[in-house]
Amino acid sequence: MTDNRVGAGLADGRPFRLGFLLHLDEDVPPATAYEQAIELFRLAEELGYDSGWVIQRHFRQGNEHVSAPLVLLAAIARHTRRIRLGTGVLVLPLEDPLKVAEDAATLDALSGGRLELGVGSGPFPGAWEAFGQEIKNRHQLYEASVARLHDVLDGVSLNSLGEVLHPPGHGVRDRLWQATTSDPDLAVSAAQAAGKAGDGLQLSRATAWREASPAVARARQATWIDAYRAAATREPRVQVSRAVYPHPDPAEAIRLVTPGVRRWQSWLSPKRDVAGLGVEEYLAADHALLGPPELLAEDLAGDPALRHVTDLLVSFVPGVPDRAEHRRLLETTARDLAPLLDWRPAA
């Protein structure tokens, strides 16, 4: 029998926290994109979203505008009061972990303890080259960087004078997340390492770019989550991302996302053979869920990787919708889709 439920259950009686992942890839000036980010975070807060997350991409890789996510989140913090502010993810091996800890602890103090710091190793070779690193070493460098970050946030002595991180980073340490690799040969051990460290586990949306089918991808993610939970030394925190596009008319939804699909195909083609795919073929491979909220909720409820999530992260991709459509998607997800999975805003 299929276990049709989403969420591990929270202390406040809700099944999971709801977050959204913000992509900013429109061809607009950076300042305009950042203003839109502030606007969308404020709307999400009004709608009851528990968290909002921004990604990190250097040099507009993936057409994104966000190369300095902690700086952007600091600006968003000044315009919001409750919503948690996440990085999904900050590419840690290309940063100095001590400087990341200083910036993160400062942002956490400014925001009243709302930072959710997600870190990972990053997939873009060009960024590694620019920062003088070799991407073939990314897993080893990531492990060393995250160990250093743990020590700094834990308050270890940093020099012969006995000086420690300031502002203190204990709150950030309690809200640290690790985005594990999607390499099947390494994913289980990476998930176990995050659990042993007491960190949260972040998993991206399950796509067919590496897997043969949605069912295979989701089942593998469920296995990684089981390994993480078994190794966890603190209360498990599991975040899984899913691409959703709730719309009452599936045909209209496909029409609306077609420009974004074509846009993504144009920059993905050098990396993956996607140029010849039709729109619906691309959406199937990307595991994007389009259609009425009732059908999307049914699909999500049968997703084995979502049974033990504490945090469901929705993204409205492929392709970033325009401002009005982005607002509609935030509203429809919070008011029509998530309640079908028993989510409700926190009191």
Image (cartoon, rainbow, N blue to C red):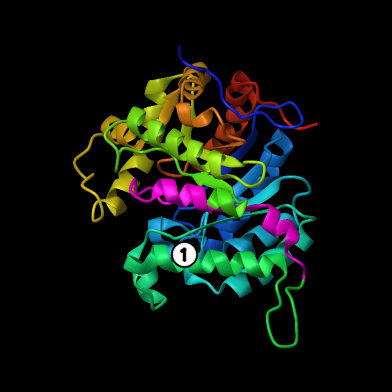
Q: Nearer the viewer, residue 92 or 158?
A: 158
Magenta span of residues: 167-193
Residue 45 place in picture, x, y as percent: 71, 41
Residue 47 place in picture, x, y as percent: 70, 34
Task: Describe residue 189's horizontal placement relative to residue 329 as left or right.
Answer: left
Residue at disc 1, secondary structure: helix
Quadrant where the image shows the C terminus:
top right
Q: Nearer the viewer, residue 68 or 18?
A: 18
Q: Residue at x 60, y 26 (%)?
A: 338
Is 272 magenta? The answer is no
Quadrant where the image shows the N terminus:
top left
Residue 343 place in picture, x, y as percent: 66, 26
Task: Describe residue 294's horizontal placement relative to residue 131 as left or right.
Answer: right
Q: Residue furthest top?
A: 1
Q: Residue at x 77, y 45 (%)?
A: 82
Task: Describe residue 313's horizontal placement relative to residue 103 as left or right.
Answer: left
Task: Examine the rendering and report whether any part of residue 243 can be seen.
Answer: yes
Reply above or below: 273 against 242. Answer: below
Q: Nearer the viewer, residue 280 or 242?
A: 242
Q: Quadrant of residue 106?
A: bottom right
Count up the numbered dots.
1
Task: Examine the rendering and report whether any part of residue 315 can be seen.
Answer: no
Q: Amino acid at mark 1?
A: Tyr
Q: Nearer the viewer, residue 47 or 327?
A: 47
Is 190 magenta? The answer is yes
Q: Which residue is mark 1?
A: 142
